[in-house]
Image: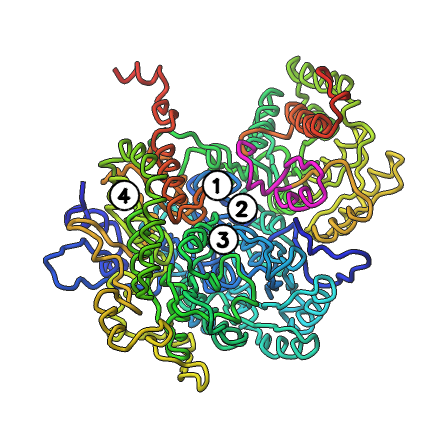
Amino acid sequence: MLECMPEGEVVHTVGKINPTKTCQPIGAMYAALGIHRCLPHSHGSQGCCAYHRMHLTRHFRDPVLASTSSFTEGASVFGGAANLKTAIKNVFEIYKPDIIAVHTTCLSETIGDDLPTIIKQSEVPEGKVVIHANTPSYQGSHITGFSNMVKAMVTYLAERDEEALRRKRVNIIPGFVNPSDMREIKRITASLGVDMTMFPDTTNVLDSPLTAKYDMYPEGGATVEQIRDSGNSRLTLALGAWSSNAAGAALMEKCGVPCVPLKVPIGLKATDDLIMTMREKFDAVVPEDLTLERGQVVDTLIDTHFHYQGKKVAIFGDPDIVIPLTEFVLTMGMIPKYVITGTPGKAFEEEVGAMIEAAGIEDYIVKAEGDLFELHLWIKEESVDLLLGTTYGKYIARAEDIPLVRVGFPILDRAVHPLMPITGYRGCLRLIEMISNALLERRDRDCLDEDYELVL
Amino acid sequence: MSMSEEMMGDMLEKYPEKVLKNRKKHITIVDTSQACQQIEANTRTIPGIITQRGCAYAGCKGVVVGPIKDMVHIVHGPVGCSYYAWGTRRNKARADENTPADKVVSTLCVTTDMQESDIVFGGEKKLARMIDEVVEAFHPRAISICATCPVGLIGDDIGAVAKAAQDRHGIQVLSFNCEGYKGVSQSAGHHIANNNLMEHVIGTGPDRDPNDRYVINILGEYNIGGDGWEMERILGDIGYKVNCVLTGDTSILEIKNLHQAHLNLVQCHRSINYIAEMMETKYGTPWLKVNFIGVEATKKTLREMALCFGDEALIQKTEEIIAREEARIMPVIEHYRKICQGKTAFAFVGGSRSHHYMHLLRDLGMEVVVAGYEFAHRDDYEGRQVIPSIKIDADSKNIPELHLTPDAEKFQEAHVHLNMSKEKFDELNKQVPLSYYEGMQPDMKDGEVMIDDCNHHELERMVRTLRPDLVFAGVRDKYFVQKLGVPGKQMHSYDYSGPYAGFNGAMNFARDITNAMTTPAWKLVTAPWEKQNQQ
C-alpha cells in the first residue's frame, strides 16, 4: 500500500495531499439536519449537494435529505437569485418543511450572491422560515460551516422575552458530534435535573429506527420554537470552541444569555467539567448514578493501564474532537506523539501543545491545517503504536502496519459508531475498550507461539 | 403491480404547474404498441427538486479520469471536491507489468485547497507550485488537473499552467475544464474527459503489432468491485488480448495505445460513447455495445464478439468457455433463482447499468418495473437512432464537440481492423449491430416505467405505491427506501461487494440480493408488543 510514498526530505508547502478536513457546506448541512422539519438547501451546483448528502449518508447510514439550487452556466454568469427563489417556492410546495436552511458554496460566494436580499424577495408561506449561512468553501473547514450554520440559527431565530425567562434552563450547543453523543449529553443533563434545549440536535434524525413507516422529517431535531426560545434560557454551554463558540457568543450578544465555553465532553476531565459547570450554575445535585459511572471509568483505567500506558499515538481529525481526545489519551498515560487537525487555527496548536507539555512530554508535533500526507511522512521517520482518527487513516494504517481506532467524522468503513457515544463516562469506557482491544489484538497477532497467552 | 396513468397523475399532482409540465415529459409508461415513445432527458433539473444528479466535475474526475492509476490527479479548487471524490467509487487498481507498485498513485487525494486569497488574486501560481512539488515527491508518469466551480469564474487558465508544467517537467499534464456548473449533470463531465483523452492521449503510443490477433479495448468499464478483472478473465481464457480497459485499473501508457485494438467494446454507453465514436472516425475502429451483466447477456456479448472476428476457432473456443462457466455457475444461480423468482425491482443507476441489470435480474426470474437514469440522454433510453433528432440546447452547446477527420496514417476501414472482406463485414453488420446501441426501452414491457432524473418525491411515492421487493439506487436513496421496509441496494458501489460482471459476478450478485431480501431482521421490524397491540 502506498509504495509511491517518497523517502527522505519532501517539500510540501502548498495545497493538501490526503486532507483531514473538507469544505464548509457539508458542516452547514449537518447542522441544519438538527432542526426539526428542516430541509437544508445548498445554493450552488448540484454536485455539492450530491456529494454532501453522499458523504453524510455514508457516515450515518441513514437518509440525508437536502435540496439544491442546481446552478447551470447561465446562473453562474448572471447570478443565482432566480434559482434560489424558484427553489424556495418549489421546496415549500413539494416537500413542505417548516424551515429551509440555505447555505452557500464556493460558486455562489465567488459570484457574490446576496442571500439576505434574495431570501427577502422570495415567496415564503405564512408561518414558515428561511434562514441562511454564508459558507464559502475556500475558508476554514466543514467545522467552520457547521459553526456558521449554528450561529445563523441564533441570529435568525433566537429571541428574548423578559416575561418568559427560564431560569432553570440551559442551552447546549453540542458541536459537530454524532447523534449518540448528543443523546448521551442530554442524558447526563437530564440526570442532573437541568432543563435543556439542545440545538442542533440530530438525535432521532440520523439515528432513526426502522419502522417501515418512513417520514421525510423524522421526529428529532430542535424545533424552530425551541431555538427561538433559547434566548430566554439562563445559560448556554458551547461545547467545542470551533463548532459552538460563535453561536454561543451570538446568543449572548443578541439575547444576553451568558455563555460558558467547554470542551466536547470526551474523556474523564472534560465530562467532569461539564457536570461541574451545571452543578455550579444550576445548583444541580449530581446523582449517584453519575458518580458510579465515573467510578467505573477510574476503576477501568487502573485495571487496564498496562494495556496502553506509555504507547505512542497519532491523533487526527476535527479540533473539537481531537483536543479532548488528546486530553483523555494523556489521562490514560499514553503519549500523543503527533496531533493534527485539518482545520486552520493556531489556538489548536497552543491548546494541545500546552496539554502535552503539562504532562511532561517534550517530543511531540502538533499542527493545525495539516494533512495526512505530512503525518505519514512523520510516521515514516518515527512510528507510533496506534492511530486514532477517522477512516482516512486506514491507508497509513496498512502502509505502516499500525492499528487504527476509528473516532470522529467521517467513519465510512465501519458501522454502529453513530449510535454509540464517545462522550460522557460511558464514552470513556468505549474509548478504553476500543484502544485496549486494538493494541491487544495486535499483540496476539504478532507474538510468538510461546508468548501467546490465554489471559491478558 | 404496474404503474397506471392514474397512479402517475396522483404522483405528479403535488407539483406546482411548471414542475408538473416539466416532469411529465421525463416519465414514460412503456406501451409497446406505440412505435416510438419519446422521453425528455439531459435537460436542466428544476431548482429545489431533490435530484440525484451530480455535477460535471463528478463525471469528469470522479468517473472517467480519477481511476487512471499512474497519474496524480490534482483537483484545483477548495478542498471539498477533491475530498469527496477520494476513494469513493471503488475503482480497483493494482500494480502490473506496465505499472510497478511505486507508480500507482491514484489512491492519493491531491488538492490545491484554494483559500480566499486564491479566489481574489488567482490560483495559477499555487497550482504551478503544487505540480512542481508533486513531481518532485512522486515522480508520476502524468498529471491531471481538474477544475472546480470557482476556477472558471475567476478565470484561472489551467490549460496554460498545464502546458508550462509539461514543458518544465517533460511529462504529460492534462487539464480538464470540468467546472461543476457546466451542463446539467455528470454527463457534461464525461464528455469533457472523453474529448481531452481523445485529443491528447489516445493514439500517441506505438502502432499495433501486426502479429497480434483479437485485440480489444473495453471502453466505459471502471472496474468497480473488480468487474473489469472478471471480464478480462473470461476474455483472456477465450483468447482475446485486452489492450486497455477505459478507465478501470488502467494507466496512461495503456490509454496512449488505445488505437491498437481491432475492436472497441462499449460497456457504459453514456460515459464513453464519445470516444468510441471519435475513434471510429479517426481510426476506423468499429465498436460493439456489450453487456457483461447477466449470464445470458454475457453469453450474447461473447458470441457477438466472436462473430465480429468471424474466426471458427474463436467461435468454438467461445462456446467451450461458455459451457465451462455455465457448468460451474448455473447450479448456484438456480439455487438463488428459486428464491428470487417473481420478485420486482426498481433500478436507478449508471449510464447503462439500469438497462444492464434488467438482464441479470431476468436470469434470476426478477423483473425491473421502474427504471431510469440520473444523467442519461435520450439515446440511452430510446436508442442511438434518435441522436440526429435531439435538440441541442444552451447547456449542451457549452460542451465543445471535437471535429475529427480520419488519421492520415492510422485510419483503416472497419473490415480491415477485423481482418475480413467488405462483403463479410456487411453480412456481419446485419447479424451484429456494430456502432449502435438500442437503449433500454426495447427491453422493457408494457406498463413498466422509464423515468429520467427521478427525484426523491417520485421515488418515495412509487415505492409506496408499487412496493417493489428491491430498489437498486445510490447511497442517497438506499436508506430512506429501507426505512419504508423495502431492501435497498447501492448499485454504484455494490454495497462494497463485487464483482457483479461476468459469470462470477452473476453468482455474487445473486447471493447478495438474495441476502438483502431475506436477511432475518426484515421479519423483526414490528416489536412483539406492538404486534399484540395491533391484534
To which chain does the residue with label 3 belong?
A
Judge whether A294 appears above or below B196 on screen. above
Tell us which disc is closer to us: 1 or 2.
1
Task: Find the magenta span and give its range.
Answer: A390-417
Q: Which image quadrant is residue A232 in?
A: top right
Point out the frontmost of discs 4 and 3. Answer: 4
Identify residue type, mark 3.
Tyr
From mark 1 to mark 2, how far is it between C-alphas? 9 Å
- Which residue in the protein does label 4 denote? B363
List the residue tagged with mark 2. Answer: A153
Looking at the image, do the residues carrying marks 1 and 2 touch, with CB atoms under 8 Å apart?
Answer: yes
Q: Is residue B372 left or right of residue B410?
A: left
User: What whole-number distance in Å separates the C-alpha atoms at marks 4 and 1?
Assistant: 46 Å
Disc 3 crowd rating (10 Å Cα; few below 14, some 14-19, many 20+) is: many
Q: Residue at x 25, y 70 (%)?
A: B429
Kindly identify which numbered label has been placed on residue A51. 3
Which mark sits nearer the N-terminus, 1 or 2?
1
Residue A229 in the image: x percent, y percent?
Answer: 52, 37
Question: For residue A402: magenta?
Answer: yes
- Of B509 and A9, nearer the camera is B509
User: Which of label 4 and label 2 is nearer to you?
Assistant: 4
Identify residue for label 1.
A35
Q: CA distance from mark 2 to mark 3?
A: 24 Å
Q: Position of residue A219 (x, y in %)?
A: 42, 33
Residue B458 visible, this orientation: no
Judged from the image, the secondary structure of the residue bearing numbered disc 2 is helix
